[in-house]
Image (spheres, rainbow, N blue to C red):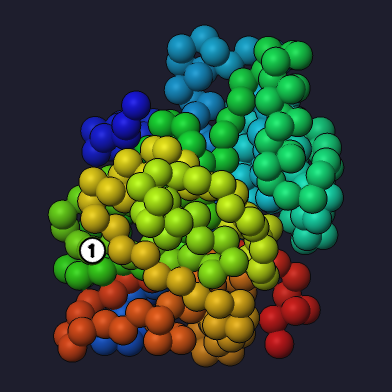
């Protein structure tokens, strides 16, 4: 199963009015930020969550049993928000290591929160068990067609908002965002996936020729902490020749501080990963190259920004 440009376009129509059309700003000549951290719940994730729930509602799959989801935090926030907006119950499984800032926000969204294990993969297994027991709808964090198509609406907006650009830098965890944006952008620009060196899901998949499990670690693990790249994302990044760039924790920490100091953007570590590629020199644009950076997550404790 793959996700097509038509799927992304249909998702955009389906979720219109449910999500924000987030702004772009030109911060320097040839450098634009897509401010997806201003999306509902502080990340791009509601796009995919709404598309999954609304599609299931139309097909009759969304019942009174509601939804279950597993998350490092951001997807759980999005799934709980979408469920609340549609009036169905949500049970969200998160690791015990989920940051307090994300847990605090989850508790405001009327969801049943279950903490289990030390990483996303363990929470996901618990969510699968709950789905099998209750018949609730599973809303995957990154590897469902409706989710990937919903995330791809970021790319459609970029094509409409940002004028001509050559390259878009996107953070990668499980791959829902990179897969969706690559599908939406197609041949209009080069898509570059930026990953923490301690969780290189896409880089490893491209090297191995298929998504494979690996260790998860580093400062961005709560938002980019998948063990492997999703199958849908892998197909998309191969089809659209997505490049891979790795950044280490020091570069991510420095990029996050710079986004706050220079641009007054309060991001979590995962939200600063794409910018870290430029700020650290891990990605070096050619002369005259026009670059868009997707700043994708804001769920952090502001006290840790300085």
Q: Is residue 264 visible?
A: no
**Where on the picture, by quarter, is residue 23?**
bottom left
Q: Secondary structure at mark 1?
A: strand
Q: Quadrant of the N terminus?
A: top left
Q: Residue at x 58, y 16 (%)?
A: 62
Q: Position of residue 174 (x, y in %)?
A: 52, 48
Q: Looking at the image, can residue 298 be seen?
A: yes
Q: Residue furthest front?
A: 208
- Residue tagged 1: 190
Q: Nearer the viewer, residue 125 or 8?
A: 125
Residue positioned 50% across, 75% down in the render: 247
Q: Residue at x 16, y 58 (%)?
A: 188
Is 118 drawn above or below residue 92 in the view shown? below
* Residue closest to the far top: 60
Labels in figure, total: 1
- At 70% from the left and 67% from the top, the residue drawn is 300
Of the pair 54 and 174, the residue shown nearer to us: 174
Q: Locate residue 146: give its quadrant.
A: top left
């Amino acid at each position: 199963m793959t996700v097509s440009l038509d799927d992304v376009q249909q998702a955009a129509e389906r979720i219109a009015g449910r999500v924000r059309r987030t702004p772009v700003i030109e911060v320097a000549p040839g450098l634009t930020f897509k401010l997806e951290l201003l999306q509902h719940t502080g990340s791009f994730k509601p796009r995919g969550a709404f598309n999954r729930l609304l599609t299931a509602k139309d097909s009759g799959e969304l019942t009174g049993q509601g939804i279950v989801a597993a998350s490092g935090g951001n997807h759980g926030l999005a799934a709980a928000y979408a469920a609340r907006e549609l009036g169905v119950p949500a049970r969200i499984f998160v690791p015990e290591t989920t940051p307090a800032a994300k847990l605090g926000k989850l508790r405001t969204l009327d969801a049943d929160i279950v903490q289990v294990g030390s990483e996303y993969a363990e929470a996901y297994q618990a969510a699968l068990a709950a789905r099998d027991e209750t018949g609730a709808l599973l809303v995957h964090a990154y590897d469902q067609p409706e989710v990937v198509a919903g995330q791809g609406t970021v790319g459609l907006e970029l094509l409409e908002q940002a004028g001509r650009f050559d390259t878009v830098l996107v953070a990668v965890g499980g791959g829902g965002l990179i897969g969706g944006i690559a599908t939406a952008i197609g041949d209009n620009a080069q898509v570059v996936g930026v990953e923490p060196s301690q969780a290189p899901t896409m880089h490893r998949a491209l090297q191995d020729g298929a998504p494979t499990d690996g260790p998860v670690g580093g400062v961005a693990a709560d938002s980019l902490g998948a063990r492997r790249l999703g199958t849908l994302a892998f197909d998309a990044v191969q089809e659209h020749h997505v490049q891979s760039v790795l950044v280490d924790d020091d570069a991510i920490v420095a990029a996050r501080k710079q986004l706050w100091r220079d641009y007054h953007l309060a991001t979590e570590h995962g939200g600063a990963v794409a910018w870290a590629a430029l700020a650290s020199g891990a990605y070096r644009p050619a002369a005259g190259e026009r670059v868009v950076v997707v700043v994708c997550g804001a769920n952090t404790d502001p006290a840790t920004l300085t």
